[in-house]
Image: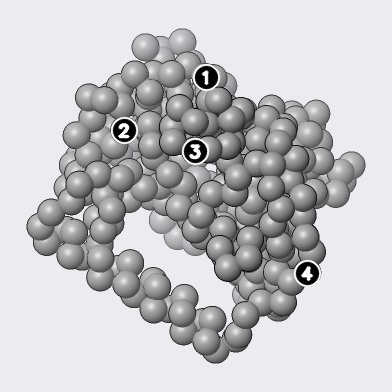
Amino acid sequence: MYSDDTRAEQAHGDPRTVLTRSPSLLPLLAAGALRSPFKRPSATADFPRTRLVLPGLRVDLARLAAYERVCGFATGEDALPVTYPHVLGFPLAMRLLSGPGFPLPLLGLVHTSIEITRYRELTASGEYELTVHVEGLAPHRRGTEVSVVTGLRVGEDVVWESVSTYLARHRTTGAGTDRGRDRDRDRDRDRNQDQEKHGPLPAVAEWRLAGDVGRRYAAASGDRNPIHLYPLTARLFGFERAIAHGMWTAARCLAAHGTPQAVLVRAEFRAPVLLPGTVTYAADGERFELCDGERVHVTGGVYPLAGHGSPDGLS
């Protein structure tokens, strides 16, 4: 079904599918939604090992400017915001996650965290090779997590990469569930210890979010998930109002925080942000968060890289 825009290759022992253009998101989202009821999610299920590759990628500067405006980044500079390559890779990720061979249902798949490493400043006028693959599945106390790796190369050098985790909620039993609970407990313990060590973050700004933030971000990013667009479409999926994209909340925080050229960024999406609404951006040193009273929506950190270099193993 993809023969018009792909060719299969074998490189370094990995199956590679080379694309001639970025996939269209809407057909992928529709196909994923139609296939979702027939999926049987499990942390032990097989998953596609294909690495999607899009060479010769150039950035649409008009879309980039729209993205920068809605997320609060400076416009007009020959630079990519640290989160923008995620937008470039999202259609490729959706092609993998919506496919018939992927075991988790696309409907209800929740973006829970992202870790981004930028090894140097990225120009908006540059040419890149984009790669996306599924790293693996893991048990979670509420279901199964999947890790998706996205990378950007210039020549042979990896200049940016990310690992996103998505959660498919389903009933769980057995040893895998115990491992998932142990890992989640460790995460909660580390988070609580960090909060005890550093104390609560001081408020920096209060942001009043308009009801159209989700639609504006969708237009700039291409992610038109119905839960982000209108109250009516969000209610179909159990939300009382539209919710902000998780990656918009992370990008908005990072635009306010600022990032060095070589940086490691982590963000964890804890709770949805309802639109319209009011949230507080808090930050101190490397750490930041987005909250509403006692409810924390996003936690994260910005860590400069020292002695950085491209990692081995991303091919």
Q: CA distance from mark 4 to mark 2?
A: 38 Å
In the image, farthest residue toward the right: 76
Q: Can you say whether 285 is above or below 97 in the image?
A: below
Q: Is residue 233 left or right of residue 101?
A: right
Check disc 1 and give the amino acid type.
Answer: Leu
Label 3 belongs to which residue? Answer: 239
| Mark in the foreground, 3 or 4 | 3
Q: Is residue 258 above or below residue 283?
A: above
In this picture, residue 282 sits left or right of residue 2 = right
Circle number at residue 204: 4
Q: Disc 3 residue type?
A: Phe
Residue found farthest to the bottom:
197
Q: Nearer the viewer, mark 1 or mark 4?
A: 4
Residue 195 position (above or below residue 16): below
Q: Residues within 10 Å of mark 1 (few under 14, many from 20)?
A: some
Q: From the top left corner, tell me how far across and down residue 101 is, in percent.
A: 26, 28
Circle 3 residues within 10 Å: few <14, some 14–19, many ≥20? some
Q: CA distance from mark 3 to mark 2?
A: 19 Å
Residue appearing at x 30%, y 22% in the figure: 35
User: Label 1, on which residue?
Assistant: 26
How far apart in space, not on screen, are marks 1 and 2 (Cα)? 16 Å
Do labels 1 and 3 touch, CB within 8 Å? no
Q: Residue furthest left?
A: 174
Q: Earlier in the sequence, mark 3 or mark 4?
A: 4
